Image (cartoon, coloured by chain):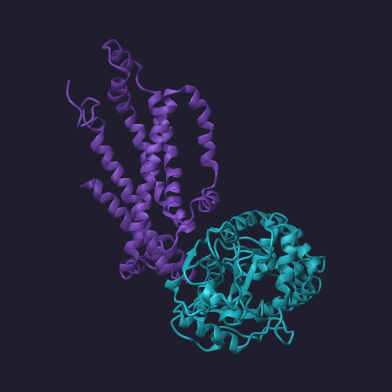
Chain colours: A cyan, B purple
Amino acid sequence: MRLRSVSVALAGVLGLSSMIGLAGPAQAAAKTTTITFAYDFPGPDFELTPLVVAQKLGYFSAAGLKVNVVFPPDTSTTTKMLTTGKAQIGFLTTTDMGVAINAGAPILSVANYSMRNNWALFAKPGSGVTAANLKTRLKGKRIFSYGDTWTEAMLPFVLRHAGLSTSQVKVITAPTGNDLNYLLAGKVDFSTSTTNYEIPGFVGSGTKGKLVQILGTAVGAPDVPIWVYAVTRGYAATHGATVKAFLSALKRATVWAAKNPVAAAADFTAAYPKSGYTPAYNKMGWQLTVPFLTNAQGQYFVQTNAQWTTLATALKSIKLISSVPAASSYYTNKFLP
Amino acid sequence: MRNVLIPIVSLVVVGLLWQAIVVLFHVAPYVAPRPLQAIQAVTQNWSSLWPLTLGTIRETIYGFFTGAGLGVGLGVIMAKVPVLQRSVYPVLVTSQAVPIIALASPLVLIFGFSVVVMVIIVAWIVFFPVTVNVVDGLSHVDQDFLNLARVYGASRWRTFVHIEVPATASPLFSGLKIGATYAVTGAVIGELAASSGTSLALYQEHANTNLNAAGVYGTTLLMTVIGISWFLLVVLAEVALTPWQRRSVARRYPWSRRG
């Protein structure tokens, strides 16, 4: 999902060099397995915080792992990096998983990253739009999209909820644009993104007022997790212990980062000082991510049949995929710590 | 005939190599399609793709002529006013060092999501090689020809039209050919940044997002065909307008009067 500006991402790619030397404390296990982790975006951002924490606190090295992070040239290439062996573990949106399985890619989600849907529509401060009056305020309006599968999948639900068809609004797709700039400049009426990215961006812009936020789940979008960790089925079959060790270390780090959001965000900033994002942006972004990492039972990572069936049904209804396969086609919980 | 056959054979060889790599290495269709699958992705969706292709062609043409016109005009002025040349040249070079992608967003903020942004981006790419080549061409006109014109009492305008412009034709067309090659790239960048609804670049973007590799490669082929066609049209224009480059005839435009 392309929810972050490409310009910042490009700057972030330059920060890749900062990963050099980012090894954990000297707790090297007797045998170290090196794995490559492919992110979902061309540059690093605060959603990598758990991974950075796992590196910094030595959780990976304690588990006998050396994890190299790579960034895809675009948001659609992570799947291909997994299936061509360029990476062993990837970070994907669940919609990308749905599309990949539909295209025949042999990949498997091994853990949720976030547990709920924080995708939203945003309007300028003072616009007076609310979830209650959205139905009357959306018709004929310009809605920004980065062209990501998540927005492609969620927007039809919102429009249906508002009793509108896609022809009754103007969806402006600009993969290389910056939605907040366009929204605040009045070039679009609504932007679409996730709360953890959009709100820090707005605050960082220094614009007065409060960004109007209408959470997708309040206006018809299904409440399903957005991001997952995935591997190929072949890798899962042959390297199950490695996947389990990775998730175990990552869960420790995620729990720590959720309990210590300020320190964790600072760790991310230190790991990627040239990412193009400010420490304040990273801190706020990570703090806004934390509430979405657990389900109602306070669990991390756990996937359910319901989440995948709901998502696949949604994707089929908008013809993004051709059929709804069994939930087991998408995921397994067997590697969870 | 040989001039036509050789490029065709080269393209067929590239297609066969592509096919062989995909088959031999068992490349999954969502990673890279076979050549025929890419072509089918175009033919089977032609009714959707044709209007989008026309849009890209339109942006390419508008931007190309805008950029070429500006390039020629600026080149002539710079060549004739040395002070201007010295002051503007560094600005021109700097303008080309600015990443186009970084320009797109401010242009959208100024002009909105419209074809104007795409035309500006294409023109931005095209005008520089044209300007540079026109300046170079006009700066290197054979001094003997200019002296001869002066001896015959030719006006500055007639000297410009009958000596300087023909002498600049060759470098000008070199600049136009470079611009023609990159114009479609500019149009695609513009479409990614400023499409108000649909476009060929967004079609490709959606195909990429949906792991439809055949669609991605098919649209890439379409964009390539636009670029090559435009380049060939410029070459044809060059052949028609500069006959002296291929035959022993005086530098004179086909429509100019004798004597």
Looking at the image, residue A145 sits to the left or right of residue B19; the answer is right
Q: State whether residue A32 appears in this view.
A: no
Q: Nearer the viewer, residue A165 or A96?
A: A165
Q: Position of residue A46 (x, y in %)?
A: 70, 65
Q: Position of residue A29 (x, y in %)?
A: 78, 72
Quadrant that contains the C terminus of chain A: bottom right
Among the 4 quarters of the image, the one containing residue A131: bottom right
Q: Nearer the viewer, residue B109 or A76?
A: B109
Looking at the image, residue A318 sits to the left or right of residue A223; the answer is left
Q: Nearer the viewer, residue A4 or B14?
A: A4
Q: State whether residue B181 appears in this view.
A: yes
In the rendered image, the vertical position of residue A85 relative to residue A73, given as above or below:
below
The residue positioned 75% from the left and 73% from the top of the image is A64
Looking at the image, residue A128 sits to the left or right of residue B141; the answer is right
Q: Nearer the viewer, residue A161 or B66?
A: A161
In the rendered image, the vertical position of residue A163 relative to residue B192, given as above or below:
below
In the rendered image, the vertical position of residue A28 relative to residue B166, given as above or below:
below
Quadrant that contains the N terminus of chain A: bottom right
Which residue is situated farthest in the left direction here? B258
Q: Position of residue A48 (x, y in %)?
A: 69, 67
The residue positioned 38% from the left and 65% from the top of the image is B20
The residue positioned 40% from the left and 67% from the top of the image is B215
Q: Position of residue B9 (x, y in %)?
A: 29, 54
